[in-house]
Amino acid sequence: MTVAMAKSIDLEKLNARFEKAQPEEILRWAIETFSPKIAVTSSFQTESVVLLDMVSQINPAIQILFLETGWHFPETLAFKNEIVKRLGLTNVTDLKADPKKREAFNAKSGGKPYEADPDRCCQINKVEPLEEALKGLDAWVSGIRRSQSETRKDIKVIETYPEGPFKINPLANATSGDIWWYLKKHNLPKHPLFEKGYLSIGCWPCTRPVQPGDDERSGRWAGREKTECGIHTSMKPKLKKPEAPEENQEGNNI
C-alpha cells in the first residue's frame, strides 16, 4: 500500500459513513479502492451466498479464498461448486495447511486433531493458511455479522490489524432477517444441510445442528468453551488509524 493511501484512510470517518450504508455500497467502495490487492473469504454456506452474489455483480474476478481444511461436509463442497458456477465466480482459491505440519499433528493426535486440540487444529488448518494468503494484500472482505454471536457484536465495518490488510465487513450491521430477505429476493439457494438445523457450518467433526432458542453459531464446537476458529480473533484487530509506512519503504500501488 502506498504512503498516500495509508494516510488517506481515516477509519473513524469511514466507519461513521458506512454504519448505516447498504452492504453493496461498502463492498463497491472496497473493491474500487483496493483492487487488485483485495480478496474475499467465504465458507460457502447459506449466508455466504449473499456476499458472493454481491461480489459477482461488481466484479466476479475478485479473488475468493476458501479454507479447505480437509474436514468439510461433502455437502459443503458440492454447494461450493454449485455457487461458483451459478454466480460465474472466476477466481476461487482453496487454501490448505502446510502438509508436513498437518500430517505431523494428525499423527500425534491419533487422526483426530479436532478432538485432541481443536484450537491447534484450527490454527494449522485455518489461521496459518489465511495469514499466508493475506500477505501482500491491502484488503480482506469478510461476511461476518454482529448479530451472529456475542463474540462478534462489537465488530466494525472497517478494521485494521497490527500486521496485514484492512478488513472490510460489509454485512456487519445486517440481521438474519436482512440475509433471508436478500436470498428470497434474488432466488438464491440454501446449503443442503440448512433444513436439518445446521445454521452455521464449518468442519463436520465440530459442527452440530442448532438447538431452538440458541444463537445461530451455537452448533460450532458444541459442548466446548471454544466459539471461534481464530481467523476473526487471533489476528487481533485494532481500530485506530494505522501508521503510514516509512517514506523509503517500497509499497504496492493500487
Image: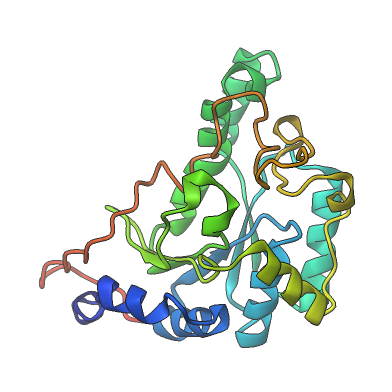
| Quadrant position of residue 4 | bottom left
Could you tell whether 69 is left or right of 12 in the image? Answer: right
Residue 212 to residue 104: above or below: below
Residue appearing at x 79%, y 81% in the figure: 185
Could you tell whether 123 is left or right of 14 in the image? Answer: right
Residue appearing at x 59%, y 30% in the figure: 102
Q: Confirm whether residue 99 shows in the render.
A: yes
Residue 220 to residue 4: above or below: above
| Most foreground residue, 189 or 153 | 153
- Pinpoint residue 183: horizontal percent, then vertical percent: 77, 73
Q: Residue furthest front?
A: 213
Residue appearing at x 57%, y 29% in the figure: 121
Could you tell whether 45 is left or right of 104 in the image? Answer: right
Q: Where does the N terminus fall, quadrant-wise?
A: bottom left
- Pinpoint residue 46: horizontal percent, then vertical percent: 76, 60
Total numbered labels placed on residues in the image: 0
- Pinpoint residue 141: horizontal percent, then vertical percent: 50, 67
Could you tell whether 190 is left or right of 6 in the image? Answer: right
- Pinpoint residue 118: horizontal percent, then vertical percent: 58, 26
Residue 172 to residue 151: above or below: below
Q: How is the image coloured?
A: rainbow
Q: Confirm whether residue 90 shows in the render.
A: no
Residue appearing at x 68%, y 80% in the figure: 56
| Most foreground residue, 168 or 82 | 168
Q: Where does the C terminus fall, quadrant-wise?
A: bottom left
| Most foreground residue, 170 or 36 | 170
